[in-house]
Image: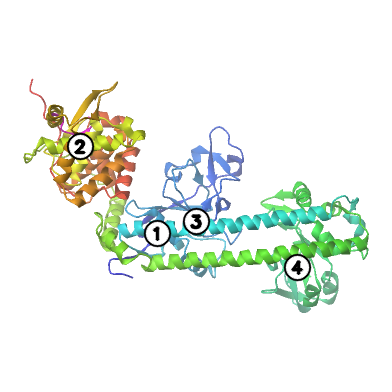
Amino acid sequence: MREDWIECKVESISEYLRGITYKKENASDKELNGMFPILRANNIKDDKINFDDLVFVDKNLINSNQILRKNDILFAMSSGSIHLVGKSAFINDDLQFSFGAFCGVLRPNSYINAKYLSSYFSSLGFKNYISTVAKGSNINNLKREHLLNIQLPLPTLPEQRAIVKKLESLFSSLDAGVADLKKAQQQLKIYRQAVLKKAFEGECFQKLENIILNSQNGLSKRNSENGTEFKVLRLADVYKQQISYTSPRTIRLVETEINKYLLRSNDLLIIRVNGSIDLVGRFIHINNQDQLAEWAFCDHFIQLRISDTYNAKYLFFYTQLIAVRNYINENMVSSAGQNTVNQNTIKNLLVPDVDISKQHQIVKQIESRLSVCDSIEQNIKESLAKSEALRQSILKKAFEGNLLTAQELAACKQAADYEPASVLLDRVKAEQNKATAKPSKKKVAEPLVVAKTETPVAKISADIHAGLIAKVIKIHEENPASIDNLSHIKCEKIAHLVEYHLQIPLGRKPVKDAAGPDDYPHLKKIEHRAKMANYFAIQKKDIGYSYSSTKNSDKAIEKFQSALSVEKNKQLDDLIALFLEFDLEASEIIATTYAGWNNLILCGNANPSDEEIVYESRENWSDRKLTIARERFFKAIEWMRKNQIVPTGYGTVVPFPKKKKS
């Protein structure tokens, strides 16, 4: 781990939120009035949210902090399937969804790149950790502490952003390849169904019970002191309708039990009961190897012994048809989370009434065609495994600090918000401590109110500011989709960031105007100079004023740009490009938030909380700002950090305007 990284616990950089609990009578599978959708563990698939199979609950059961927000990370904490536990999905946007008690959410601190943290939960290191902590406990349950106590490497904030950007770039092509492979898998499934459907077309049918010699449920006892140790088949021993010999369970059986429940070649087993609708009613064909292995079977199965006039493998293939699955689904019984199919349902299944010799012939044809499918599918599985291995290799490099090049690391260190990860972690902890601190019994003081101060500003040529406006006008005119966003107010907001963020002096003395940090007396002088020199024209709009280029606009721009270094010109181009799509109000919110944040730093609060920034930029600014939703200011802070528009305390405090003398 590099010297400017640090290792920390997840609880140091995020908050854990529990899901909601609800009673059955408070839930519905339909969206009714007063109901709110919730996500459950089965809605997490392939690191994404699947919005199928939703449950809706009484909205009064949900707290506001249990509504999913952008940058949240949703986890499956408990599930009937061990493969789901520990799965996670990143929330890209604010969602009007909550989450159930079998899920949990990590809400990363605003100083942490949430996608960096989320990427860690896709890594093999995390998966191995989950396997370790689950040993010796209920493997279907992940505790809150298991997440919060994870130790992970924390880079600097600019490097977090760079790692996420590179991961997204590398994974985009990898994901495209995986999507193609999965599409091929799906096409194979369609082909398999086409093969089966063709094989069984145009036949006469009879009930399955006509060809059954014997049927019975399996062994219900779990152990005994008498008899011989004997393997008993469980659901855990079945994978994709075939028996796995890896970890059989044995119990003592007496001879009569062995004779009754022993599986023989060409028997058919049906999964009788399971929590999964897709598994119940699935058939398993017992082959010669299974018979030699000597298995009995438990009561989760139904055994069928078929007449010699019928090919059991033919029947097995027939039961793979979608039409048979539909029959099973329509006739199974569901209760207390368990789905069950009984012997009568199985016996009433209609099956083809075909001569045994034709059955043998059809089985050979099906096996021949499906063997090709099996070979292709195996190749696809191997390719998917290689893709996953490459993904894990990339993630391993990322979290070991070996993903970025020396040039990329150097660029990170030049970022405005670069600081060692240890300093970043201290900042996060300070904010968390502030948020969890117990309120004093004394009257709580309001957030800092900035003093009304004035600082002398050096005299700057009006042509400098006029050249800036001419440049902003020209860039908007070169982008027709953005021209309607241009106004004299927006230009003033850009000017504020040029002066305070890029530190290019313009001679302004901004105050807390209703529309943001403005110096309109100064702007009037600039506009007068521009009109006299024909630098740009002023146009009256339905609301306010805008500008347009004139004969000497290029001259003003050239004069302005020649006064700046190459680096400053590049920074200026990037800043204007960021503002192109912003309308007047969006520009106002960004400039005001920047000014409020900078005010706090100038007044001694070097690391203000987001709440303090919003208060200074909204409640402590003007009545006009109170008409704008607070959430937009919080989002502005997030946008500024993302785009490295972060104040440093440069310049002078933006004060309230002086009251006019009566």
Name the residue beneath numbered marker 4.
221
**Residue type pointed to by label 1:** Lys
Query: Dot 4: within a 10 Å radius of its alpha carbon, few (fewer than 14), some, or many (20 or more) residues?
Result: few
444 or 558, nearer to the observer? 558
Q: CA distance from mark 2 to mark 3?
A: 54 Å
For discs 4 and 3, the disc positioned in front in the rendered view = 3
The segment highlighted magenta reads: 514-521
Name the residue beneath numbered marker 2.
554
Q: CA distance from mark 1 to mark 4?
A: 56 Å
**Residue type pointed to by label 3:** Ser
For discs 1 and 2, the disc positioned in front in the rendered view = 2
- Measured as percent of width and height from the top left, residue 391 is found at 48, 64
Indicate which disc, 1 or 3, sits on the residue closer to the N terminus: 3
- In-image side of 511 versus 98 (left or right): left
Query: Dot 3: within a 10 Å radius of its alpha carbon, few (fewer than 14), some, or many (20 or more) residues?
Result: many
Q: Residue at x 90, y 62 (%)?
A: 310
Indicate which disc, 4 or 3, sits on the residue closer to the N terminus: 3
Quarter of the image with the N terminus in it: bottom left
453 or 160, nearer to the observer? 160
Image height of 171 relative to 393, above or below? above
Name the residue beneath numbered marker 1.
166
Residue 518 in the magenta stretch? The answer is yes
Indicate which disc, 2 or 3, sits on the residue closer to the N terminus: 3
Name the residue beneath numbered marker 3.
88
- Measured as percent of width and height from the top left, residue 35 is found at 54, 36
